[in-house]
Image: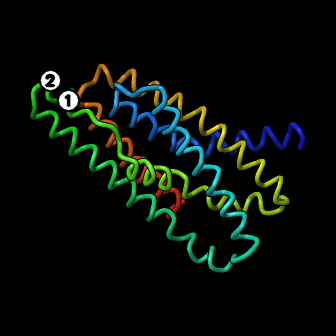
């Protein structure tokens, strides 16, 4: 493992983590009272999926490439539907909070459920499955190391996104949920557009 390999893997990690960063920002906005342990656990979920998806892609390339190739065209659709679901839910919650008093709005600020986090983790990393093609020539240990670096980079970037979002969320009140939801919807549309039209 040389410096160029590490640099390439880290650069790949930065590129792949941008969707997860945006979702982290949205979660931080939605949950301004988020504690440090929760920040690390949310970033850990995203980092795990960013590690796992390219690794799954690598395994598919080396085992069931025909099936994986057929599935690949559905990736943008899956990401779009998952992010529209979570984003729409956040927007509706924000609109609901707007109709309450400020005290009620603070009481209604609630964290994304475990199910929501899993959906977000899958939606923001599913396009990383195709990275398995780009690292197909690596042996297992090299592929695993590259995916670990991608996961570590994602973790750091997502912690930053959650902290920024949390700070801004305390100033935006109920608007933060609507903004966060709009960010998720926009990410879903962007992934779909890139996957289908570009």
Element type where label 1 sits in the image: helix
Q: What residue is shown at x 26% (from left), y 38% (from top)?
A: 178
Which quarter of the rendered picture does the N terminus lie within? top right
- In the picture as drawn, the residue positioned furthest to the bottom comes out as 66
| Residue 90 point in image, percent of width and height | 28, 44
Q: Are marks 1 and 2 in contact (CB under 8 Å)?
A: yes
Residue under numbered circle 2: 103
**Quick one: which residue is furthest to the front in this view?**
37
Q: Residue furthest right?
A: 2
Percent x, y for residue 116? 38, 50
Q: Give how far across and how far down residue 172 sits, in percent.
A: 28, 24
Q: Is residue 43 left or right of residue 66?
A: left
What is the distance, in whole Å, between disc 1 and disc 2 at their CAs?
A: 6 Å
Residue 16 x %, y %:
60, 46
62 versus 162 height, above or below: below
The residue identified by callout 1 is 107
Seen in the picture, residue 59 relative to 40 is either above or below; the reply is below
Say which residue appears at 21% left-offset and 34% top-offset.
Answer: 108
169 shown above or below 12: above
Which circle marks residue 156 in the picture?
Answer: none
Tag 2's secondary structure?
A: helix
Judging depth in this view, the residue of 48 and 83 nearest the camera is: 48
Could you tell whether 6 is left or right of 130 in the image?
right
Residue located at (48% from left, 39% from top): 42
Quarter of image, res 169: top left
């Amino acid at each position: 493992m040389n410096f160029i390999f590490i640099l390439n893997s880290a650069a790949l990690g930065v590129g792949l983590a941008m969707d997860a960063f945006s979702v982290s920002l949205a979660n931080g906005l939605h949950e301004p009272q988020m504690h440090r342990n929760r920040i690390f656990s949310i970033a850990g979920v995203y980092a795990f999926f960013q590690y796992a998806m390219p690794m799954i892609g690598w395994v598919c390339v080396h085992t069931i490439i025909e099936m994986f190739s057929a599935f690949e065209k559905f990736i943008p659709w899956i990401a779009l539907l998952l992010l529209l679901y979570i984003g729409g839910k956040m927007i509706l919650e924000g609109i609901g909070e707007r109709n309450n008093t400020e005290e009620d709005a603070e009481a209604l600020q609630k964290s994304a459920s475990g199910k929501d986090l899993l959906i977000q983790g899958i939606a923001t990393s599913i396009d990383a499955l195709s990275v398995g093609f780009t690292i197909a020539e690596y042996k297992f240990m090299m592929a695993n190391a590259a995916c670990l670096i991608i996961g570590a980079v994602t973790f750091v970037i997502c912690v930053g996104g959650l902290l920024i979002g949390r700070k801004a969320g305390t100033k935006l009140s109920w608007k933060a949920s609507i903004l966060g939801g709009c960010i998720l919807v926009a990410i879903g549309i962007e992934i779909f557009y890139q996957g289908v039209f570009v």
